[in-house]
Image (tube, rainbow, N blue to C red):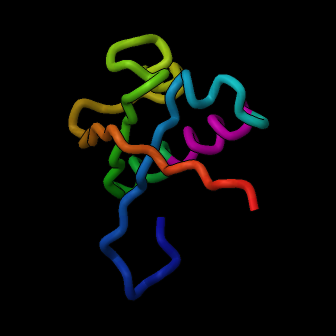
Amino acid sequence: MTTLTDRPNTALLVIDVQNGVMSGAYERDAVVANIKTLVATARAKEVPVIWVQHSGEGLERDSEGWQYVPELVREESEPLVHKEYGTPSRAPS
């Protein structure tokens, strides 16, 4: 999957592609389709896929918004990292 021959230890990180995050995203369907293609390619090439899932205000654990979008399904063998800290908002310049 990598074109960097001197860096064989690669992985695909799938970060925060959750219902509550993606619901109003620009070109949501195209973005999710691209991520789905990346996941399938990584799996086919035996590149590890690591899932990161945010929880916090507006994304309460186990809520519908917290769930990954239905088009993306994590395999049981793929690691899942739970996080509670998002990127801080930038103040207007």
Q: Which of the pair 92/74 is nearer the observer?
A: 92
Q: Which residues are magenta?
A: 28-38
Q: Which of the pair 15/50 is nearer the observer?
A: 15
In the image, taking residue 3 as reference, residue 7 lies left or right, namely left
Work out whether 31 lies above or below 4.
Answer: above
- Label the magenta part by its dominant secondary structure: helix
Q: Is residue 29 magenta?
A: yes
Q: Which of the pair 86/47 is nearer the observer?
A: 86
Work out whether 91 lies above or below 37.
Answer: below
Give the residue displayed 37% in from the left and 44% down from the top: 85
Q: Residue furthest bottom?
A: 6
Give the residue displayed 35% in from the left and 57% down from the top: 47
Q: Which of the pair 21/8 is nearer the observer?
A: 21
Residue 20, horizontal then vertical, whole percent: 55, 23
Which of the image's four quarters has the C terminus? bottom right
Choose top left, top right, bottom left or bottom right for residue 29. Answer: top right
In the image, taking residue 54 as reference, residue 36 lies left or right, namely right
Total count of labels = 0
Residue 49, horizontal then vertical, whole percent: 36, 49
Q: Is residue 65 magenta?
A: no
Residue 57, horizontal then vertical, whole percent: 44, 25
Give the residue displayed 68% in from the left and 40% down from the top: 31
Residue 83, horizontal then vertical, whole percent: 31, 40
Work out whether 46 lies above or below 61.
Answer: below
Give the residue displayed 39% in from the left and 47% down from the top: 43
